[in-house]
Every structure is written in C-alpha cells, then in structure tokens.
Image (spheres, rainbow, N blue to C red):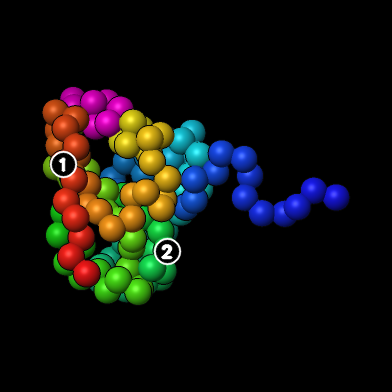
Amino acid sequence: MPKKGKKTGQKGKVVVDVKYEIQISAIARQSGYIPINIPPLDHNLLDSLLLEKYAKGSYPIVTGDKKMYKENPPEKGATAFISVSNVSQESMEIVLLSLRTLLNNNTARTLAGKRYEISENGETTVFKLEI
C-alpha cells in the first residue's frame, strides 16, 4: 500500500489573488504547486482577513496588491508575497515567464520570508519581509 502524502515534485501550495488567475494557476500547477484560488465573493475581504482565511500563515500568495504585505501578521498571513500589479496586456507574457521561472526555481519554503515584485519588463526584485 503506497503512503499517502505529497506527490513527487510537489512544492507546496500557493494562494492566487490576481486579475490573471487562470493563467497564473496553470503556471503554478505546471511548476509543481497546488494553487488555491480565491472565490470572487471573497475578493472584497480586507487583506488581513483574506490572508488569514487562505494563506493561514503557511502559504505564499501571488497578488496584484503591492502593499498587502504591510498587513501581514506572521503567524496568520502569507509566508511570501509575489506582486504582479500594474501589468499591461502587452507585457503580460513577459511577466508570466518571469513568474514561471521564479516558481520553477523555488519551493514554498525557499520563497518564505521574502517579498517579490515582478515589473512590466519581467525584472524580479526581492525584498526581505520585516517580522
């Protein structure tokens, strides 16, 4: 009888809260993550409630809100923030490619404790989260 648990190559879960939810969820799945999509009714929740309900202090979040990390209680919020805000339709392919590279090269554990901002030209800037 095989053991139940993580499948081979699974990197953990990631919360997806952005405009391009379908494409980003597909990238996360292809990169070995289990995406947690936020239902449309919950998009209006306060950031702190959203983090508490979905990230649960255990998962990174891909968001369009650059300032969401400021309301992050470490024990209840997200472990890492990946921000892809203010992206035009023309530069979306470049941003998605940068996101794919970031997720392919990291696990949920190696992303933890950092904030990533992906700009329109595909550059990823990394900041350490203040705890």
Side of 125 where 46 appears, left or right? right
Which tag, 1 or 2, sits closer to the chain's start?
Answer: 2
Residue visible at 46% across and 35% down in the picture: 31
Q: CA distance from mark 1 to mark 2?
A: 22 Å
Q: Is residue 6 magenta?
A: no
Q: Secondary structure at mark 1?
A: strand
Q: Quadrant of the C terminus?
A: bottom left
Kind of residue sitting beneath label 1: Thr
Residue 23 appears left or right of 81? right
- Residue type (three-letter) at the residue carrying disc 2: Ser
Q: Tell me: residue 49, above or below residue 15.
A: below
Residue 21 disc label:
none
Percent coordinates x, y for residue 106 in the rendering: 38, 41
Mark 2, secondary structure of its residue: loop
| Numbered range of the magenta stretch | 90-98
Res 123 → quadrant: top left
Judging depth in this view, the residue of 64 and 106 nearest the camera is: 106
Furthest toward the right, the residue is: 1
Q: Quadrant of residue 26?
A: top left
Magenta residues, dominant SS class: helix
Please name whichever residue, 55 or 92, is drawn nearer the observer in this view of the structure.
55
| CA neighbours of label 1 inside 10 A, class few (<14), some (14 to 19), many (20+) | few
On residue 125, the disc is 1
Residue at position x 49%, y 51% from top? 12
* Residue where numbered disc 2 is placed: 58
Q: Position of residue 79 (x, y in %)?
A: 33, 60
> At which x and y percent is residue 6?
62, 50
Residue found 35% across the figure and 32% down from its top:
100
Residue at image position (46%, 48%) is 35
Q: Is residue 121 above or below residue 106?
A: above
